Image: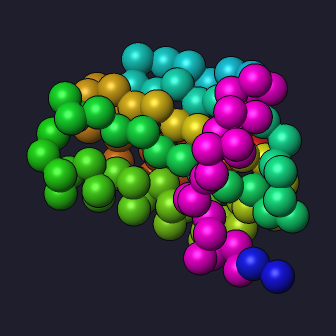
Amino acid sequence: MLKPTKHISKFGKKELDNFFTVAKAAKKNQAFTILKAPATHVFGKILIMVPKAYGNAPERNKLKRRFKAIFINNKLYEHRLDLVIITRPTAKNYDFDKLSQLLIEIFA
C-alpha cells in the first residue's frame, strides 16, 4: 500500500484529467482558487500551482511546503478528497495560520 505522506502531491496524467472533469470549486477569493473532487486513491491528494508571477523559486516552494505541511499535520488526506490549489500573487499576504484556516474550512 502507498504511504500517504510520500505520494500526497503526485498526480498522474490520467488522474489530473479525471480530476478536472469532476472537480467543483470549493473556495475562490483574490488569492486562491481551490478545486475539490473525490479521491481516486484510499487517501486524498493535494496539488499546488504557483505561477512565476508569485515570486522567485524559494518563495514559491515555501508556499507549497506550507500547504503540504498543513495537509499532512491535520491529516486532511483522510477525508478522501483531492485538492488543486491555484494561487495568485496576492497570496503573499497569507501567513501560516491563515492558510491553515483556509484549508481546514474546506474540510469542515
Residue 3 in the image: x percent, y percent?
Answer: 71, 80
Between 70 and 48, the residue placed more toward the observer is 48
Q: Quadrant of residue 17?
A: top right
Q: Left or right: where does residue 10 sit relative to residue 61?
A: right
Between 69 and 108, the residue placed more toward the observer is 69
The answer to whether residue 93 of the structure is visible from this angle is no
Residue 46 in the image: x percent, y percent?
Answer: 60, 51
- Tell me which residue sits at (17%, 52%) in the image: 57
Residue 63 in the image: x percent, y percent?
Answer: 34, 51
Residue 99 in the image: x percent, y percent?
Answer: 47, 46
Q: Is residue 21 magenta?
A: yes
- Tell me which residue sits at (26%, 48%) in the image: 60
Q: Quadrant of residue 49?
A: top left
Look at the image and tell me in which quarter the N terminus lies.
bottom right
Compared with residue 51, is residue 46 higher up or lower down, i.e. above or below? below
The outermost residue toward the left is 56
Q: Which residues are magenta?
A: 3-23
Q: Left or right: where does residue 7 sit relative to residue 82?
A: left
Compared with residue 36, is residue 46 higher up or lower down, i.e. above or below? below
Tell me how many marks there are. Answer: 0
Between 53 and 105, the residue placed more toward the observer is 53
Compared with residue 4, is residue 35 higher up or lower down, i.e. above or below? above
The answer to whether residue 63 of the structure is visible from this angle is yes
